[in-house]
Image (cartoon, grey):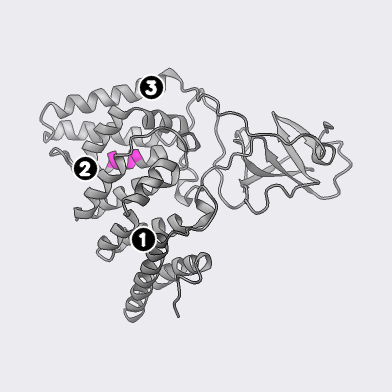
Amino acid sequence: MLLIKLLTASIFSLKYATAFYANGHKLGVIDKFQLDTYNSTTDELDVFQATNEFRLVKEGQHIPPGLHVKIDMQTGQRWAKLVDTNEQGNYHNELVIKDDDIIEHNEAREAPKLTQPEKEEIYVPSDYRIAVEELNSFIKEVADGDVSKSDVSEKLSEKLEEFEDWVHDIKAGYTVSQNREFLGHLLDLSTLTKSWPKESSVLAARIIGSAFQNNPYVHDSDVDASIIPRFLEQLESESDQRLASAYIYAISSLVRANTALHKEFQELQGISLLRSIFGKNWAVDRKIINLVVDFFDPSKTYSGEAVLSPRDKDDVRSWCAELNNRRSEEDLARSTKPEFILEALENLKTNYPHECTFD
């Protein structure tokens, strides 16, 4: 393999060179509102958060494995995005990045195919675990006392809010996902098994969602599967819009992040249950629509293939009919909602033209 230097490479006639980072691991899609919320700690690298579109990599940001990267050969600036599964493997005259060295792919074409390395043990700094244990102890202490006291509820909400900001860090999120006792306490707090302040319950649900959201570390990790039925059961009877939205955010993050939880949601027919609460509140409905579209989008599933089971096809048909009826109702009301609903319908129809039909 031929090592090359960016400034002296004469084999490139184009301004940009495109590249893959080694190990071929594709990260999950990140929501637009999440782009600027990553906060690195003082001893952690600032990690670039990828989307389906090229974005400028800021100076000093670490590019995680598995991204498609463009390099400006004149300025050295880099742009990166998630790898398109339809394009991966077709870069015969481009760059491959391996261990921070740049190699020219033409020279390496006949080399043995790189195999996916065994999953490395994730190193989590001890202070991450300490932070989780401290909040866990505080929640237990509050649960044993009078949670209705204003000073107690304010302190609890304050701690949860700070923790929710921090848990977007993928190692922090992984630490939370592996602590079953802490997850159990967050579930109890979020699903109102005690007279918890509602603000604290909302934050607890969001912490669970944020810990899993777009977190590659939790993809195949062992996670308590009971977390999905607990949220679904509570969601079915929840009338508070903020709590219902927080539950859907958590469920969406869980099923997109972890294969076992995705399967659990599917087996519990969670996608059908969502229809029973659809239509009560537009803010909640928007989150439900996003979850449904993502759940049935092959590009956002682990197999990369459209669902084929009869039950899944029935769910697609039911949701297309539901959304089309809702679109017609909103058209009559002359609201702006039909545009959002139509976009969801078109996405479903693109992937399932036989199951999703509408005018």
Residue that carries the numbered disc 1 in the rendered image = 286
Looking at the image, which is closer to me, 261 or 343?
261
Give above or below for 264 relative to 298: above
In the image, residue 32 lies at what x, y percent?
A: 48, 51
Secondary structure, mark 2, is: loop
Ranked by sequence position, the earlier of labels 1 and 3 is 3
Whether residue 338 is situated above or below residue 239 in the rendered picture = below
Q: Quadrant of residue 109?
A: top right
Residue that carries the numbered disc 3 in the rendered image: 129
Mark yes or no: residue 292 visible.
Answer: yes
Dot 1: element:
helix
Q: Amino acid at mark 1?
A: Arg
Judging from the image, what secondary structure is the residue with disc 3 in? helix
What is the CA distance from the residue labelled 2 to the residue labelled 1?
22 Å
The residue beneath circle 2 is 191
Which secondary structure class fits the magenta region best? Answer: helix
